[in-house]
Amino acid sequence: MTLPTRIKHVVVLMFENRSFDHMCGWFGRGDGLGPGTFNLEDPVTPGSPAVPATRDAAYVGDLTIEPGHALLDVNEQLFASVVEPDPPIATNSGFVWNYTRQAGNSPAGARRVMRAFDPGSLPVLSTLAREFVLCDRWFASVPGPTWPNRFFTHAGTSGGFADNQFRDYQFQTIYHRLDREHHDWAIYFHDFPHAYTLASLRTPKFAPHFPFAKQFFLDLKHGRLPAYSFIEPRYFDFLRWKANDLHPPHDVRLGEHLVADIYEALRKSSAWDSSLLIVLFDEHGGLYDHVPPPATINPDGKDSISPPFRFHRLGPRVPAVVISPWVQQGVVDSTVFDHTSVIATVRELFDLGGPLTDRDGAAATLTHLLQGTARSGTPTALERPPEPTADAFHADGTKAAMTAEHVAADLAIGAASSAPLTEFQRSLVETAHSLQAFQPRRAGIVSRARLVDNEHEGAVYVRELAARLFER
């Protein structure tokens, strides 16, 4: 049986801002953490106190001060210097030092960047890593923030930009290839699809390919799963609908529930026997990882001017689990991957032609993990974190419904989040501002007049725009 007929559905769930060591370092499998792993409080001062990697990360509360993950922050984390050395040999020695330097932090608070999860705290991710394939050399495509890394997943490039800013991004994407070859695809989202920042996807033709996340489960139920599905989590806390993107400081338990929801629905569907699910993170979010990222190739000859970067090296490792009945149980794969490996794999599986860029042209694919026969006996249900509120929310569809009555009830008891916006959330709010130009004039004026001061207001703002754009 050939690869294209064996795998008919690829599903990618991409979370936010957690490193491999932070989530998977204590799984006891692959290149993880040990008792001798540490950072110095000040890597350039001899005798500086050592801060060990620990296994006591909390679901919430550790990272109320957001770790740095802009490119210059990552330089400090990897090289203990804002300026990239020549040659760029990473020591991964500056994570604590960089976190100390974030506004409002202290040396004592900066130690939290070395905290990692005990496997028992992550029953969903750790079970899937044992049952399927854990990749311990999957690196972010860029040693920087969310936007360029997500662009590399969709297009194999960020067009020479290494920041989180809205621009006229006209890249050709894997979705254009799928469309050209008449394969269906969807970008499922919860509150706002970051992929919609790509101008090349903002066309009337592609608008039906952006359904809300609930449609993923309906498509599975009715046998309509596309050939390629990309799932974006909820990026904002909106009343009872809490963010499940895992971006600090959001509750990690809710990300665990999202993984379990997607896996269990896929496992029980008719699509399971022909599916490949990839659970992935866009970048490390400033959290400690001990493996120096390797060199790579520039995708298209374009360099970033500010911040200066030649796209010649990968970012820190991120968690990645490959899930399918066609992969062996309990494998740790140490192939060097980056996010363009998703593009290269989809191109190979669906015979979509040559590479989009030099980066995905050189990327390793996942197809070597596929074996000749499908496994039976893969788990149909996963143990979830012991969090009653989240359990009840996920188990009760009527409670989870986003209705006017539920919104009014939550507002009446003051359930709205007053947390400040994260840097990524601010970038999505600014995107919504920019996209108002595409809306009817009156709607645009009203929306731009609204002040967005906290997470709840940001959630309302971007979701109202998404409703106007995509609800059908």
Image (spheres, grey):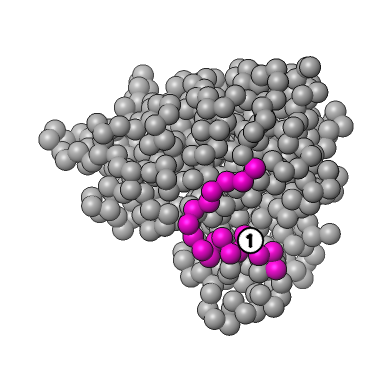
Considering every residue shown, the one lying at the far left of the view is 47
Q: Position of residue 272 (x, y in %)?
A: 73, 36
Tell me the quarter of the image containing the C terminus: bottom right
* Residue ID at (76%, 42%): 269
Q: Secondary structure at mark 1?
A: helix
Considering every residue shown, the one lying at the far front of the view is 377
Please check the rendered image and state whether residue 385 is part of the magenta-colored stretch, yes or no: yes
Q: How many marks?
A: 1
Q: Position of residue 70 (x, y in %)?
A: 45, 42
From the viewer's perspective, is 188 left or right of 235?
right
Please check the rendered image and state whether residue 281 is part of the magenta-colored stretch, yes or no: no
Closest to the observer, 374 or 152: 374
From the viewer's perspective, is 149 left or right of 184?
left
Q: Which residue is mark 1?
A: 395
Q: Position of residue 380 (x, y in %)?
A: 65, 42
* Residue ID at (60%, 64%): 393
Q: Which residues are magenta?
A: 380-398
Mark 1 is on which residue type? Ala
Is residue 357 shown to the viewer in this render? no
Is residue 132 shown to the viewer in this render? yes
Closest to the observer, 334 or 390: 390
Tell me the quarter of the image containing the N terminus: top right
* Residue ID at (62%, 71%): 450
Figure check: 362 above or below 275: above
Mark 1 Cα shell of 10 Å, populated few (<14), some (14-19), many (≥20) = few
Residue 323 figure quarter: top right
Figure check: 13 above or below 236: above
